[in-house]
Image (cartoon, rainbow, N blue to C red):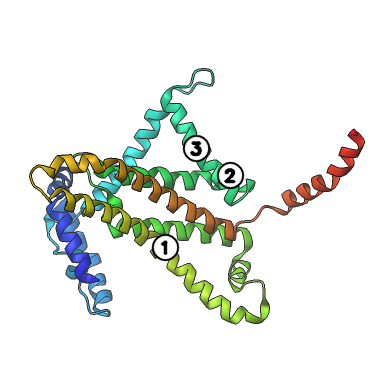
């Protein structure tokens, strides 16, 4: 595991675009001193318990790579996400919406409909977080297609951070809406006499979720890059440009699918812990009970 992480870190560091090198040129010394003083000793103590070292997990510590490429690229992805939304939004108009506004509205409506189908009508309040995940992950996935950029989602540090963020958010929603005892109670299942067996299984399953989210996103994005790179070197130099261009539609499809899978699973997790308010349930029941009477009155 540590050997794989070290190989990945070393390979990406060698391919780091000029933007990453410039950031490290100006801020690398400060970041290196901070790491050596604060974070390196803690990683050394923790990884030693598993027979590893910080160098084995993250590569050699130097001022030239003190700020990892994926950190720089993820910050760029955040900035690009805001910029892309601003560009697509353009000048909002109800009468004559532009192509960018229509594209943005299409994405918004698609995610909103997904939330309504999976979580329910009350799930609209989670739309800002889910849509933020969607835009940020899609932009991060697509960055690898453009010169001077790399996909930050091809790094486990970024994908695990996204998975943990989703994990923290849906557990926060479950605790805030149901209370911590009821939130834990739902892990025991509806059958009380096998709760002692179901609870530890569900608890372990929940703690595995951020890692499954992260490793799925990383694995597909990293594999997509590896496949394109391997095929591009089959008959060099002729396949350097022809193959990546030919595989680009497939790569874009992978980016879209991985974005969809991440937000789909996040919504499924939210649907487990979030429920419609009792007032809405009572109102819906009253409406359902009154429907036959209204139909007869109309007839």
Q: Which residue is at a point 19% across and 56% down the rendered structure image?
A: 31
Please state the horizontal and vertical placement of residue 166, each as a whole percent of the image.
Answer: 45, 56
- Kindly identify which residue carries mark 3: 108
The image quarter containing residue 195 is bottom right
- Kindly identify which residue carries mark 2: 124
Number of other residues with Cα within 10 Å of mark 3, as a class: few under 14, some 14 to 19, many 20 or more: some
Q: Secondary structure beneath disc 2?
A: helix
Please state the horizontal and vertical placement of residue 68, each as a whole percent of the image.
Answer: 21, 54
- Kindly identify which residue carries mark 1: 210
Give the mark nearer the N terminus: 2 vs 1: 2
Question: Of 175 and 254, which appears nearest the observer?
Answer: 254
Q: Are marks 2 and 1 in contact (CB under 8 Å)?
A: no
Depth check, mark 2 against mark 3: the one in front is: 3
Q: Is residue 66 above or below residue 135?
A: below
> Which residue appears farthest toward the front when viewing the image?
235
Give the mark nearer the N terminus: 3 vs 1: 3
Task: Tell me: 163 left or right of 222.
Answer: right
């Amino acid at each position: 595991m540590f050997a794989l992480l070290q190989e990945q870190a070393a390979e990406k560091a060698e391919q780091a675009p000029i933007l990453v090198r410039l950031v490290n040129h100006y801020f690398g010394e400060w970041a290196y001193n901070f790491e050596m003083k604060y974070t390196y000793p803690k990683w050394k103590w923790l990884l030693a318990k598993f027979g590893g070292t910080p160098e084995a997990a993250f590569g050699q510590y130097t001022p030239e790579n003190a700020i990892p490429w994926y950190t720089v690229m993820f910050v760029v992805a955040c900035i690009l996400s805001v910029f892309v939304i601003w560009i697509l939004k353009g000048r909002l108009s109800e009468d004559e919406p532009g192509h960018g506004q229509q594209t943005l509205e299409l994405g918004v409506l698609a995610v909103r409909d997904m939330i309504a189908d999976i979580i329910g009508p009350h799930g609209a309040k989670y739309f800002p977080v889910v849509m933020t995940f969607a835009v940020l992950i899609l932009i991060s996935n697509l960055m690898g297609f453009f010169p001077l950029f790399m996909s930050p989602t091809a790094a486990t540090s970024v994908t695990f951070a996204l998975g943990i963020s989703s994990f923290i958010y849906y557990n926060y929603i479950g605790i805030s809406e149901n209370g911590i005892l009821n939130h834990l109670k739902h892990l025991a299942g509806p059958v009380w006499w096998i709760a002692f067996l179901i609870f530890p299984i569900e608890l372990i399953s929940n703690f595995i979720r951020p890692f499954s989210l992260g490793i799925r996103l990383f694995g597909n994005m990293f594999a997509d890059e590896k496949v394109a790179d391997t095929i591009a070197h089959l008959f060099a130099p002729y396949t350097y440009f022809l193959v990546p261009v030919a595989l680009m539609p497939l790569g874009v499809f992978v980016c879209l699918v991985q974005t969809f899978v991440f937000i789909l699973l996040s919504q499924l997790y939210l649907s487990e812990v979030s429920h419609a308010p009792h007032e809405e349930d009572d109102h819906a029941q009253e409406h359902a009970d009154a429907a036959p009477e209204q139909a007869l009155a109309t007839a």
